Image (spheres, helix red, strand yellow):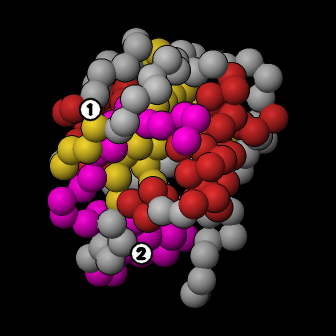
Amino acid sequence: MSGRQKNDWYPTPEIATRRLLDVEMFDEQIWEPAAGDGAISKVLKTACYDVISSDLNDYGYCESGIDFLLEQKRAADSLVSNPPYKLAEEFIRHAIALGVDKHAWLLRLSFLEGQKRYQRLFQDYPPIRVHVFSQRLTIWRGDQEISSSGTVAYAWFVWRATYTGSPQLGWL
């Protein structure tokens, strides 16, 4: 198998979510709208959060057939997710439109790049914090075995509904 996974399913390593929880606190209830096989949700539950998990596709973990981009109401005021990368900007903009108070997204560090993205998103809706992984994560397609170390730089991008300043940069 080569190329992108058909549904852009790349399960989040447990360490990635644990590292986020080392530096960020969320409301008691968290929404995970791209839950996949529950990789993030399970870690959040272990940390005593009440997690609402859903996904468009069925990976055997949570309620499926739920398209986050079509949701009209937020399920919780906090959200943590590793969205389909090809739809990441749309997911973030939709969370903002729904009025999610605090949302964190696991994304490639290169998500920061680009004049058009800056104009469409960052200019008016900057993240409050960007937590960069100092050691690269190994994230593989959900339908493949992990076979080597990571080659892509990742970070957690965190938004707050009322924030308009410059992002704070930190390392995990």
Near-viewer residue (43 or 157): 157
Q: Is residue 37 above or below residue 139?
A: above
Q: Residues within 10 Å of mark 2 (few under 14, many from 20)?
A: few
Residue 134, percent from left and from top:
18, 59
Q: Is residue 77 left or right of residue 138?
A: right
Our reading of the magenta stretch's main secondary structure is loop
> Is residue 127 highlighted in magenta?
yes
Q: Which residue is mark 1?
A: 21
Amino acid under disc 1? Leu
Q: Is residue 59 above or below residue 51?
A: below
Query: Which circle marks residue 145 in the picture?
Result: 2
Q: Which residue is most to the bottom?
A: 2
Image quarter of the N terminus: bottom right
Q: Earlier in the sequence, mark 2 or mark 1?
A: 1
Element type at mark 2:
loop
Q: Is residue 131 above or below residue 99?
A: below
Residue 24, percent from left and from top:
28, 28
Residue beneath the point at 60% across and 76% down: 4
Query: Which circle marks residue 137 in the picture?
Result: none
Amino acid under disc 2? Glu
Residue beneath the point at 46% across and 43% down: 105
Element type at mark 1:
helix
Near-viewer residue (134 or 170): 170
Near-viewer residue (102 or 141): 102
Residues drawn in magenta: 123-148
Q: Nearer the viewer, mark 2 or mark 1?
A: 1
Residue 6 visible in the current orientation? yes
Residue 47, percent from left and from top:
28, 25
Q: How many marks?
A: 2
The alpha-carbon separation of the residues under discs 2 and 1 comes to: 26 Å
> Is residue 56 highlighted in magenta?
no
